[in-house]
Amino acid sequence: MPLRLPIVSKFDPSGIRDAQTGLDRLGGFARSAGTLLAGAFVAGGIAAGAFAVSSLRAADESWK
């Protein structure tokens, strides 16, 4: 079966505008996802620090 492609004889700038809008939305999503990911790393770091402190306190109590 041959591949059939439509022939465009007239330039339509709406396709470029649609692509630009899509890229802008994708960029906004990437910035939001990056912010959320950074927040998750900060929260994970805080949780790890709190766990380390509680572990050290428990070790100190068991030593006594």
Image (tube, rainbow, N blue to C red):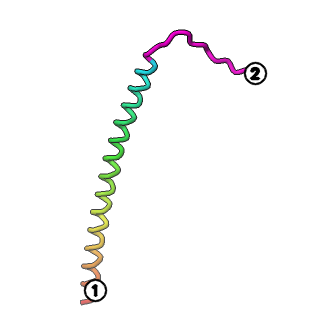
Give residue 43's position: percent from left, percent from top.
29, 58
Residue placed most toward the observer, 62 or 53: 53
Magenta span covers which residues?
1-14
Q: Amino acid at mark 2?
A: Met
Give residue 58's position: percent from left, percent from top.
27, 80
Q: How many marks?
A: 2
Give residue 62's position: percent from left, percent from top.
28, 86
Residue at horizontal 30 percent and vertical 76 percent from the top: 55
In magenta segment, residue 50 = no
Q: Is residue 9 above or below residue 15?
A: above
Name the quadrant containing residue 63. bottom left
Answer left or right for 49 relative to 13.
left
Quarter of the image with the C terminus is: bottom left
Q: What type of secondary structure mainly makes up the magenta span?
A: loop
Residue at horizontal 47 percent and vertical 13 percent from the top: 12
Residue placed most toward the observer, 39 or 19: 19
Residue at horizontal 33 percent and vertical 57 percent from the top: 41
Answer left or right for 7 relative to 14.
right
The residue beneath circle 1 is 62
Mark drawn on residue 10? none
Give residue 19's position: percent from left, percent from top.
44, 25
Secondary structure at numbered mark 1? helix
